[in-house]
Image (tube, helix red, strand yellow):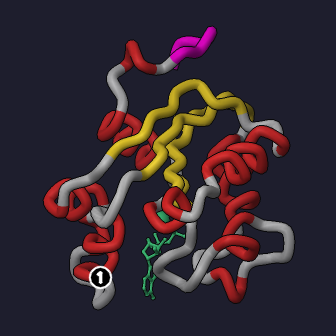
Amino acid sequence: MIERTLSIIKPDAVARGLIGEILRRLESGGLKIVAAKLARLSREQARAFYAVHKERPFFASLTEYMSSGPILVSVLEGEGVIMKNREIMGATDPAKAAPGTIRREWGKDVEKNAVHGSDGRETAASEIAFFFKPQEIHSDRKP
Ligand code: IDP
Ligand code: MG
């Protein structure tokens, strides 16, 4: 099943100059980039993006972090891309992420874990629409 997913390179990873390294990992893993741009979330936009976590103790810190600097948002497309991207990212906590994953290599801690990836088809659709207009997605396929 051809899917799309939203990927974010988070502010600390952008600030450390890791955009190229991380996109290389995704592309080397066979994931196709069909849209990409730098963005900067306001605190309110970060709260809206992570609304599902609003009751969690780390919500304030997470939304401050995610609005602290520019991010690189992209749309990835391909067969089973949602799970493939999560495999290449690694577990939420970099200390528990498998060797060779993006989070293991570049995540600082469980919050500043370098990348975001959608966790399912419905969240992928709403997260992609949060950042991209349909005409900004350059794919041969219809969604
Ligand atoms: P995911 O990014 O692997 O899907 P989620 O549970 O959806 O993980 O959490 C969203 C984001 O919230 C994480 O990527 C991380 O930045 C942050 N986060 C998750 N759990 C914790 C925690 O226990 N402490 C601090 N931040 C956390
Ligand atoms: Mg998640």
**On the rendered image, what quadrant is the N terminus found in?**
top right
In the picture as drawn, the residue positioned furthest to the left comes out as 44
**Image coordinates for residue 133, horizontal then vertical, percent:** 33, 23
- Which residue corresponds to the image point at 81% horizontal and 37% vertical from the top-left? 30
Nearer the observer, 71 or 80: 71
Chain part drawn in magenta: 138-143
Q: Which residue is mark 1?
A: 61
Q: Residue 117 placed where, x, y %?
A: 54, 55
- Which residue lies at the image location 42% right of the left edge and 19% below the top edge? 136
Residue 57 lies in what quarter of the image?
Answer: bottom left
In the structure shown, which secondary structural element does the residue marked by tag 1 occupy? helix
Task: Choose top left, top right, bottom left or bottom right for residue 48.
Answer: bottom left
128 sits left or right of 121 in the view: left
Which secondary structure class fits the magenta region best? loop
Q: Is residue 19 above or below residue 95?
A: above
Q: Is residue 47 left or right of residue 3?
A: left
Pick the residue in front: 62 or 40.
40
Number of marks? 1
- Can you tell which quarter of the image residue 115 is in? bottom right
Q: Report x, y in % for residue 110.
A: 53, 84
- Residue 22 visible in image: yes
- When the figure is inspected, residue 134 is found, relative to residue 125, above or below; the finding is above
Label 1 CB sits under 8 Å from any ligand 1 atom: yes
For image coordinates 30% across by 49% down, the residue present is 40
Q: Nearer the viewer, residue 85 or 20?
A: 20
Could you tell me the amino acid type at mark 1? Ser
